[in-house]
Image (cartoon, helix red, strand yellow):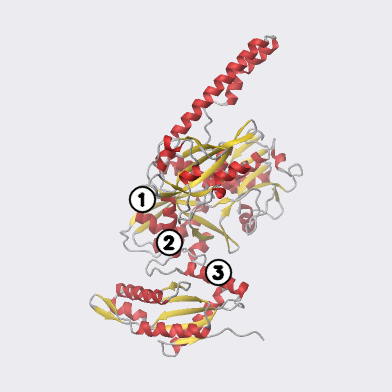
Amino acid sequence: MFVQPVQAADDREPLTFGVFAFLGEERTRAMYQPVADYLNQTLKHERIVLKVLAAGELENALTGGELDIVTTNPTHFMVIRKQIPLTGVIATLVGSEAGQPQHMLAGAIIARADRNDIRTLQDVRGKVVAAPSLSHMGGYRSQAYELFQAGVRLPEQVARLDILGEHQAVVQAVLAGSADVGFVRSGIVEMMGREGSLPAGKVKLIHPQHHPAFLYQVSTRLYPEWPVFAMPHVKEHSVRHVAAALYALEPDNPAARAAGIHGYTVPADYQSVDELSRALRLPPYDRAPEFTIRDAWEKWRLFLILGLATGLLVIALSAALMLALRRARFEQSRSHGLLLSLGEGVYGCDQQGRCIFINPAALRMLGRNEEEVIGQKQHLLFHHHRPDGEVYPEAECPVHLTLDDGQVRRGEEWFFRADGSGFPVDLVVTPLHEDKQRSGAIAAFRDITRRKAMDEKLLHLATTDTLTGLANRRHFLAQVEQEADRIRRFGNLAALLMLDLDHFKSVNDQHGHAAGDAVLKAFAQTVQASLRKTDRAGRMGGEEFAILLPETTPEAARNFAERLRQTVAALPIDFENRSLSVTVSIGVTSLSPADIAPEDALRRADQAMYQAKESGRNRVELLLPEQPG
């Protein structure tokens, strides 16, 4: 297990990290303690205190303000978000299976292998079903949604629904025969098989689904992994520090290996989880409307049947007419009230794209009044240009396309206010029908300016070395991988350089770490100033850097490296009225189509760089790949 070194005194600000005990407290703590220890080793100003809690305990702790940073399953997050104001997701877990990243989760529907009466989703009807809880995404809701799509309603159409608290207990109940069918999260069956608690061939998968690159056996579609989110009272700089530390957790880090995860990435889109909960009317969408058409039918059904039975046709027709009028008035009143109260912008247009209604929220966001909008073409009024100033053809407008083909569309768009300023929106366009004929469309939108700004900030944190401003190791390797793909496809030329500052440790020892940081910054600025727009540079760790030069021959790369070496050697670095100097050893190689992975070329460049070190430092060495044959 990854263990943080013991500190004699720790005056860092404590942050309580709450984790939902989805595997039981002991197993969940064993998984997340390495992550907490890693954060405590990485964070300079904050100290993480791990707290593993059951679902009810987690919600009580959140309500009582006892937690600062929280991670739980996606549906539990949706429930909490409706109850407590949150700052939003700051990172999403990336799981690991056989060394491969798993960005998504799903659910498995299992039965004992010898149950020949349970083969399809329809066979679940009338059976005893076991699940860990109603709030588990992979342990209940994803399976319930698949059954819902197949016409099986839970819990009405099963004999009994047993809630057992833990995934392992569900599998044991299926094996023991106390449950006919079990719901568990993706990976649980494989994990228990590896541990020896589930003998091979004892259970089978119902409704198996195949998802490319997803290594678990599952019965449902895929949903985003666990979110990490912060409470509103947590300081913004602490949120950024925690997010940056999570993004920096590499798959080969001992903490990631001990936790059995691949790391963390930028926040996923949890819209699919929200839509699932709405469809199933599960928390936080478990409250039915106060009055529905079904309620009206239940109220008047006996009256209509008795009226027809007695033959009073006129009275029955009158009652039906009155009912229709009441329904129409109610629906009109309710629709108007909803439009007025909605926080999202909503407007409707006729088949020609002219606005026929708009709610106050939309008018506020657009900076307009109703008289300016009604009767006008929505495209010419709201989104006539793209963000870069290019004209947006009306034929490509999602509203125009929905008016044309009747398909629902959703996506990001760019709207303009009356003063000419623009802002990004999430837009959903739905067709309107009258007498089975398309009569227009309804567009609902919300301003996502703050979300986009946060996404950009988090992406910058995830891809940039905070000290030098260059790409971090993970992002640089991804850029090299992209260039390697282009070389394999098109036969391009590219060169790769590894750079190491000579005697850098002596700078830290003689002048302090602040001076070392100043040297690293000045060196990074010098490297950046020497690059073309297509070139890329990254900090690989410590005083080690790398440069990617697309469309560059080995000889040209060596000449570039020599010029850079001379520039660095002549570079004066001012620090606290002292002038520091540094030299650099550079290894040069070409990025070859024969390289199986970018790491092959990096190792070759690293070898060339060490040759430069061994030859006296402050040198450039070129090492080319061996030619086949």
Query: Is the residue marked by circle 3 packed among few (<14), some (14-19), or many (20+) residues within 10 Å?
Result: few
Give the label on residue 483, or none.
none
Residue at horizontal 41%, vertical 82%? 564
Q: Can you say whether 59 is above or below 558 in the image?
A: above
Q: Disc 2 residue type?
A: His
In the rendered view, would you say 181 is above or below 3?
A: above
Residue highlighted by disc 2: 460
Depth check, front residue: 19 or 534? 534
Q: Between residues 311 and 365, which one lies in front from this camera angle?
A: 365
* Label 2 SS: helix
Where residue 83 appears, x then y in whole percent? 44, 39
Separation (CA) of disc 1 from disc 2: 21 Å
Assess whether mark 3 and mark 2 are in contact (beta carbons under 8 angstroms): no
Specify which label sits upstream in the sequence, 1 or 2: 1
Q: Which picture quadrant has residue 577?
A: bottom left
Which residue corresponds to mark 3?
A: 482
Residue 545 on image: x %, y %: 44, 76
Query: Between marks 1 and 3, how big is the CA–CA gap?
Result: 38 Å
Q: Is residue 115 visible?
A: yes
